[in-house]
Structures are given as structure tokens and as C-alpha cells.
Image (cartoon, grey):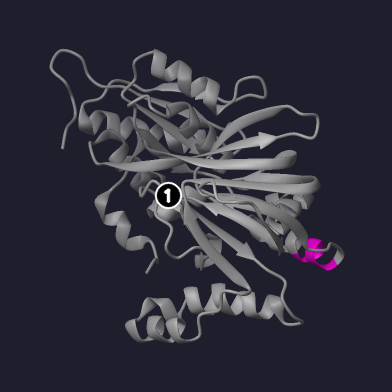
Amino acid sequence: MTNARPGKPRRAAFVYHPLKTDLDALRIAARHREQAEGWAVSAWFATTVEEGGDVLARRAVEAGVDVVVAAGGDGTVRAVAEALNGSGVPLGIIPQGTGNLLARNLGIPLADVEAAMVPIFRDDDRPVDLGLMTLYRPDGSRDEHGFLVLAGMGLDARAINATRSGLKKAVGWLAYVDAGLRTMVRESPLRVRYSIDGSPRKPMTVYTVMIGNCGLLPGGLLLIPDAKLDDGKLDVVALRPIGAFSWFRIWQRIGFENGVLRKTKTGRKIIDLVNDTKHVTYVTGTDYELSVESPEPVQLDGDDFGEVVRVRGTVAKHAFTVRVDPSWASRVPLG
């Protein structure tokens, strides 16, 4: 379907990471779709250290474009989405990074620029929530950032902080596994105090606490099976160290039960019979607070956001829309 308006053709803006994007392939695919759908030539914005995806996306919105496309990794997508919060301008995604977390949860083709480009110049939009995380720093300052998939504290954030950049470039998201194993061996669990939707704070010892907007990770790992991108809620998962076989039980829950048994009706009944809430705990809410005794690193969508002593997670329901092909939903291995 063509989206051209009488008198003035529509226009897209591409915000791309110059070190992660195959720019020639991107421009060729974009031009092909522009011509096919009757759009004007797109605007192009390369991110820099001084001007990130959020700054450039706001500039594109001010210029009156009809869609802003994030081409790059999770950091670029997260920054552009944060800038589009409440703007009414849709987000397009061309995954070009390591984890491509939101793209995976939307079923966007990861290795086919032409296929990912098609819906950007059409009108199939899906509403998506934006997680908002307020970070309270050790020096008393605070700042707020958006996240699309997962924000976390504990071994996941420590692992991302410890990820070797050279290894990440060579093997992609598997670098996080390397960092996670090294971190797990040498570091102890984390003691936290938490509150959901204003409830009294409770203590808990965890390996990791993650606040999720959706739950599918690289490798088909289904961390939070009930998380939805558009339900106006945040799903919190805590991985807890209880007993000598904690990690085996955690992996059994996430890897086998969520990834295998949950796919069938019989398997879901088995999960209900052996439900283990001791090692893997799930809660849902719209406002989540977490504090720690000493500064800890925090991660948002796989990026290190420095050390904090407290965080507060909230959600902006249907903060923006994403251009998708309706058929992509069948590509997401959920449920």
C-alpha cells in the first residue's frame, strides 16, 4: 500500500551508527522502497560521541519527517525510541548490532535489510511501551533513561560492565556469556531491598534482578515468558541463590521449562505442577524500586549505565509505535 499524500510525498529519516551499519546496503534498500511507495528521498543522520541517537531523532522530528528509522545496535534503537516518546512519529528498526533485543521480540529479520525495510514505508504500526528508569547516583544526583527490553542490576550488569570489547566484536552476544561466567565465579550474590507499586520495602538476596518490557533474549532464551511490549506493565524477574544447585535449577526453569515445555499444552501443565518460585521469582507492576547497600553497576538494554545506589522503574504505556510487518509476529517463539 502506498502512503504518499496529495501534494507532498512522505519522508523518512535514518539515524544510524556509522561503525555498525552497512551504509551502502542501507541506502540502496531505502531508495528502492522510496521509489516503490512514492516517498521522498530520506534524510540521513550519523551518530557521533557528541550527538547520539536521541539528539538526532529529535532533530528529525523537528524537521517534520513521517518516520524515524534506527539503524544500528540496541543502544541506537534505545536512544531513538526514548526521543520519540510521545511524539506521534513512528519508529522503524534496521537491526545492525550484537544483541538486537527489540528486533528479536518483534520478529524483525536480523540479516535481511531488504525485508526489514519494507514496512518502514507503509502504515502497519504496533504500539510499544517504554520503560523509564530513574538512576540514583552515589553522589546524590539522578538521571532518567528509557529502556525497551531489559534493565538490570546484579550479575547481568556486572557481566556487561566486564565484557571484553574485542571479544564482543568477534563473537557477538556470546561475549556476554564469557563475561557472565567470569563474573559468576568471582563475585557473590547481591543483597537488595525492593518495592512493587508502593508496597513496603522487602529484603532479598539475588544473583540478578531484571525489569523487563519483553522477555526474549538471543539464542531463543525466553527469560520472561509473560512479558508483553504493549500491556502497560513491567515484569520483574529475580534469579535467587538458594542451595548448592541454584544455577542448575535456574537454568532448568529458564532454558528448559520456558524454552521447551511452555510451547505445548501438556508442557505448561507440567510447569504448573513443578512451579518453583524459590530460585526464579516473577512479579508484575507499574512502579518498581530497588536499593543496594553499596554502589552497583546497572544496565539498560545491554549497555552499561554506570553505578547506582537506587533505581526506580516505571512505564510509559504506548509511548510510541514501531513499523512492522504483521507476519513477523509468527517469527517470535513465545508461548
Q: Residues within 10 Å of mark 1 (few under 14, many from 20)?
A: many
- Which residue is drawn at the image coordinates 76% and 53% (left, top)? 158
Q: Does residue 325 show up?
A: yes
What's the magenta bit mostly, secondary-structure-wise? helix
Direction from residue 30 to residue 202 in the image, left or right: right
**Which image quadrant: the C terminus?**
bottom left
Q: Helix, strand or loop at disc 1?
A: loop
User: Which residue position is annotated with label 1?
Assistant: 233
**Which image quadrant: the N terminus?**
top left
**Splitting the image into 4 quarters, where does residue 245 fall?**
bottom right
Q: Is residue 76 above or below residue 180?
A: above
In this rendered view, identify the residue nearer to me: 294 or 77: 294
In this rendered view, identify the residue nearer to me: 156 or 246: 246
- Residue 121 locus on image (x, y percent): 28, 34
Residue 131 shown in magenta: no
Amino acid residing under circle 1: Lys
**Splitting the image into 4 quarters, where does residue 269 fall?**
bottom left
Q: Is residue 126 above or below residue 245?
A: above
- Residue 135 locus on image (x, y percent): 66, 36
- Residue 209 locus on image (x, y percent): 64, 57
Considering every residue shown, the one lying at the far left of the view is 6
Q: Does residue 73 show up?
A: no
- Which residue is drawn at the image coordinates 43% and 54% (left, top)? 105
Count the numbered circles shown: 1
- Residue 59 locus on image (x, y percent): 47, 16
Direction from residue 299 to residue 297 in the image, left or right: right
Q: Which range of residues does the magenta coloring cover?
A: 181-185
- Which residue is drawn at the image coordinates 28% and 29% (left, top)? 34
- Which residue is drawn at the image coordinates 45% and 82% (left, top)? 271
Direction from residue 40 to residue 216 in the image, left or right: right
Considering every residue shown, the one lying at the far front of the view is 200
Considering every residue shown, the one lying at the far right of the view is 186
